[in-house]
Image (tube, rainbow, N blue to C red):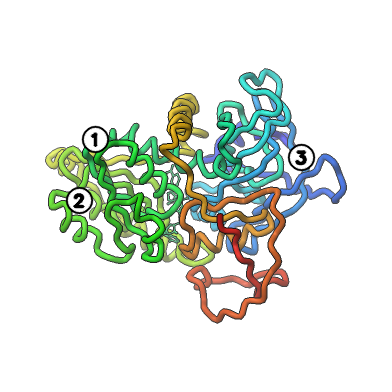
Amino acid sequence: MAKEGAEKTEETEHMIEKDAGKEPETVLSSGNAKEMRAVVLSGFGGLNKLRVTKKAMPEPQEGEVKVRVKACGLNFLDLMVRQGNIDNPPKTPLVPGFECSGIVEALGENTKEFEIGDRVMAFVNYGAWAEVVCTPAEFVYKIPDDMTFTEAAAFSMNFVAAYMMLFEVANLREGMSVLVHSAGGGVGQAVAQLCSTIPNVTVFGTASSFKHEAIKDSVTHLFDRSVDYVQEVRKISADGVDIVLDCLCGENTGKGLGLLKPLGTYILYGSSNMVTGETKSFFSFAKSWWQVEKVNPIKLYEENKVIAGFSLLNLLFKQGRSGLIKTVVDKLISLYNEKKIKPLVDSLWALEEVKEAMQRIHDRGNIGKLILDVEKSPTPLMANDSTETSEAGEEEEDHEGDNDNKERMPFIQ
Ligand SMILES: NC(=O)c1ccc[n+]([C@@H]2O[C@H](COP(=O)([O-])OP(=O)(O)OC[C@H]3O[C@@H](n4cnc5c(N)ncnc54)[C@H](OP(=O)(O)O)[C@@H]3O)[C@@H](O)[C@H]2O)c1
């Protein structure tokens, strides 16, 4: 991450370590050409911790690329970061966001492979939700001419994670079957599309029922998220599935492992179930950990089963596997060029609408990916006469500002 003002220690390079993502607190006055707009998370908690503010514009350090951002990906993980619902959270205030797309505006010393004006997508170790981002060149990828900035911002996290799990970890091959939860979400849809690139792969998916119509062509067998999917899968495939992708850590380990065929692979890659209300709930956190199944390694070998974990951001920012990820991005771009995959975008939001966008993902409303469009103006607020309480409102804090009783309609693609 580029240095802005105060010197940062080497620790800041790693998301996992405490200082990662820390931004200087200085907020500049408006009208300065060296300023940019950015979303700032002032502390962990509810939506009221998010603000759009002016910040000093970063300049690229050695080996970095400065990107004029067009669009940013909003992931479920960002919601967990906002709540402080992650392992070893960084210090606040920080600019959230792990991925963006845009145009190369400047290069740090010794930065090769890119030219000013290149259209790119990039991973960022926090700080993506801003008008300008600086990130090491190893995390930046050129995008095809016909890939829009919106598509590019919806591409890297979801497709790289899905590809790595299916092909690098689980070795997906012709004729296999895959179970994926949250099948209508960003990663879920990337998994479904990548499965369709291999002949005769059966995809079982769980998702809220209202999404089924929209995603039925990409998922072979869809179940409502609240049904007993083990029973439903067994009705169709008595001996289970080859690959289980579980982003509901703790709720499903035993069920998922039980569903595996011999030589099958169970991959844990998320903990969406830890999110209940608007703020982190220590009760659900403790409950989830209490419920995590104990895995008996002896049973694993007796039953010929593989259990794995996957974290793309750790692989990139902590474990130094950017070279491997680059080869995966190249393969994914080829699949995009061959029109075999295409990010499914749910909706576009202005930076100023980040709270509403987060509320939508929290309310399970998204089908595909949410995008923060840096050049989009906020849509006018409308009076909200709804009396319904959202799921996210269960543990709601006092909201600051005047807009509590108003809502915006998302721009749906
Ligand atoms: N390990 C990695 O490298 C990696 C990378 C990317 C993402 N992930 C993980 O993959 C999962 C999906 O990420 P995503 O960004 O693509 O998000 P997403 O699937 O678009 O997330 C939203 C969907 O998750 C489902 N969901 C499940 N539990 C929920 C809860 N407690 N609150 C709200 N929604 C819940 C809802 O769909 P339904 O109601 O239809 O079930 C919701 O629409 C997350 O757990 C994320 O942390 C991991």
Of residue 355 and residue 44, the one placed in the foreground of this image is 355
The residue positioned 85% from the left and 41% from the top of the image is 33
Q: In front: mark 1 or mark 3? A: 1
Image quadrant, ligand 1? bottom left
Alpha carbon of mark 1 to alpha carbon of mark 3: how far?
49 Å
At 55% across and 81% down in the image, what residue appears? 387
**Helix or strand or loop: what does disc 1 sit on?**
loop
- Position of the N terminus by quadrant: top right
Q: Can you say whether 67 is above or below 250 in the image?
A: above
| Disc 2 residue type (three-letter) | Leu
> At 70% across and 59% down in the image, what residue appears?
378
**Percent position (x, y) of residue 286?**
39, 61
Instruction: Let me know if residue 319 appears in the view.
Output: no
**Circle 2 SS class:** helix
Query: Residue 57 has which mark?
Result: 3
Residue 139 placement (x, y as % from top left): 56, 31
Q: What amino acid is labelled 1 in the image?
A: Glu
Label 1: few (<14), some or many (≥20) within 10 Å? Answer: few
Observer-nearest of 151 and 249:
151
Q: Residue at x 71, y 44 (%)?
A: 131
Give me the C-alpha separation between circle 3 and circle 2.
51 Å
- The image quadrant of residue 311 is top left
Q: Which disc number belongs to residue 300?
A: none
Q: Which residue is mark 2?
A: 259
Identify residue for label 1.
174
Residue 345 seen in the current view: yes
Q: Nearer the viewer, mark 1 or mark 2?
A: 1
Q: Are marks 1 and 2 in contact (CB under 8 Å)?
A: no
